[in-house]
């Protein structure tokens, strides 16, 4: 199993109550992405196996470039902020417009720096963390995709309650990832209780010709006011049909917690999103995917909770250090791998 790095972001929208003009304000045509690459993973952080998240506010100027950028929150602090700012400043858009006139607006984005495992062999490597075996039928069919698994880790390092939260395409990749991770025993277990973690597996052919893969772009939609007021969190899992470019053509809800509260929001986001596509023989193809959206009012722009001048309060939280394979990354190291979810704007 090879260790590679990528950055990704997930943004879920909510009504804002701030002085600046949000990029999806009423009467405003929001900016359209021209170039929005994932920020580079800092080499020192990658070597230390440190993961993190940075939330930023930024201004899209009338010429489509990025102007003002400010870090709102970073976990852990002091590790990824500079990389996130440098990456965001390179983004380019077709500017927002009002009455056929280009205007400046501001958006929020959240960038997650996460380490990813690449699977390119039909053989299980064994050990305390066996790699998923590339399904033979998909290897023969030259299909490439990805799976993200959520699981609980016990104090002994054993994995429990593993479930797939994202998959492209649906099917055998999911079974392979679950079969492997259920046999994992991790050497950094929690001191007490259990701890929820996620792991993403990129299934790439041994002779993969993929270079840069389009990132996932999530749409935005208003966060339910009831969830903001009552501080309700939730998640919705959907099955979506995508075209060859990854654009979602249709979506249906498979499960929702709590029932009904986030359904409309999840459908609105999914139907306006573009996922990293599945590939067959090096070409993107239409596919059925599994998509899980997590909603947290603490990370949304609920009225009175977030403005362009908000800063994170001091924290002494230690960085999350993962225990990925220490072997050289080899062929996959130079890939500009896609994020699982690229940044989008919040109103």
Image (cartoon, helix red, strand yellow):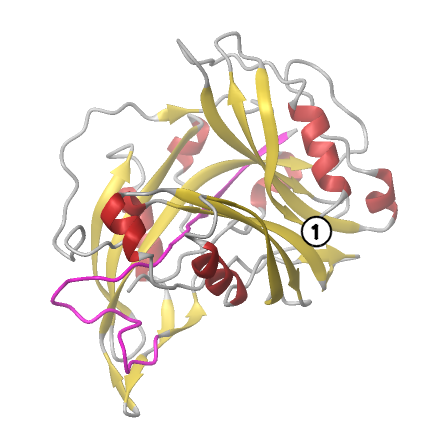
Residue 319 covered by magenta stretch? no
Q: Which residues are magenta?
A: 2-30
213 vs 327, nearest the viewer? 213
Is 18 colored magenta in this rendering?
Answer: yes
Q: Quadrant of the N terminus?
A: top right
Pick the front one: 322 or 222: 222
Label 1, secondary structure: give it: loop
Tell me the quadrant of the picture where the C terminus can be found: bottom left
| Quadrant of residue 11 within the rendered picture | bottom left
Q: Residue furthest front?
A: 259
Prevalent SS, magenta region: loop
Q: Which residue is mark 1?
A: 169
Image x and y of residue 302, in percent = 23, 54
Q: Residue at x 32, y 78 (%)?
A: 95
Q: Position of residue 19 (x, y in %)?
A: 11, 67
Q: Quadrant of residue 344?
A: bottom left
Residue in view at x 12 percent, y 54 percent = 309
Q: Is residue 131 visible?
A: no
Query: In this view of the protein, can residue 148 be seen by the observer?
Result: yes
Nearer-the-camera pick, 341 or 118: 341
Q: Residue at x 46, y 17 (%)?
A: 194
């Amino acid at each position: 199993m090879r260790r590679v790095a990528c950055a990704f972001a997930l943004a879920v929208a909510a009504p804002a109550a701030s002085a600046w003009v949000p990029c999806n304000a009423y009467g405003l045509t929001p900016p359209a992405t021209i170039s929005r690459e994932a920020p580079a993973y800092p080499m020192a952080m990658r070597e230390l196996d440190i993961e993190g998240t940075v939330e930023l506010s930024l201004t899209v100027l009338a010429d489509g470039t990025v102007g003002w950028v400010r870090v709102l929150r970073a976990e852990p602090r002091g590790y990824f902020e500079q990389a996130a700012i440098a990456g965001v400043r390179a983004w380019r858009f077709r500017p927002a417009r009002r009455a056929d006139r280009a205007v400046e607006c501001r958006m929020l984005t959240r960038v997650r720096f996460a380490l990813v495992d690449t699977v390119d062999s039909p053989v299980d490597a064994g050990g305390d963390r066996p790699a998923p075996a590339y399904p033979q039928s998909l290897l023969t069919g030259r299909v490439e995709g990805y799976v993200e698994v959520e699981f609980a880790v016990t104090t002994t390092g054993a994995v429990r309650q593993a479930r797939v939260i994202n998959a492209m395409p649906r099917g055998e990749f999911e079974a392979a990832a679950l079969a492997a991770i259920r046999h994992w025993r991790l050497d950094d277990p929690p001191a007490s209780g259990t701890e929820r973690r996620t792991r993403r597996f990129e299934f790439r052919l041994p002779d993969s010709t993929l270079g840069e893969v389009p990132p996932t772009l999530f749409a935005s939609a208003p966060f339910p006011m009831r969830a903001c007021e009552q501080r309700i969190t939730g998640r919705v899992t959907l099955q979506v049909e995508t075209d060859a470019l990854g654009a979602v053509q249709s979506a249906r809800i498979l499960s929702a917690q709590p029932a009904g509260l986030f359904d409309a929001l999840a459908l609105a986001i999914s139907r306006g999103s573009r996922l990293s596509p599945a590939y067959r023989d090096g070409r993107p193809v239409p596919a059925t995917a599994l998509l899980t959206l997590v909603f947290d009012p603490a990370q949304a722009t609920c009225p009175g909770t977030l403005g362009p001048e908000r800063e994170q309060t001091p924290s002494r939280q230690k960085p999350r250090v993962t225990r990925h394979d220490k072997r050289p990354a080899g062929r996959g190291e130079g890939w500009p791998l896609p994020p699982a979810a690229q940044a989008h704007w919040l109103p």
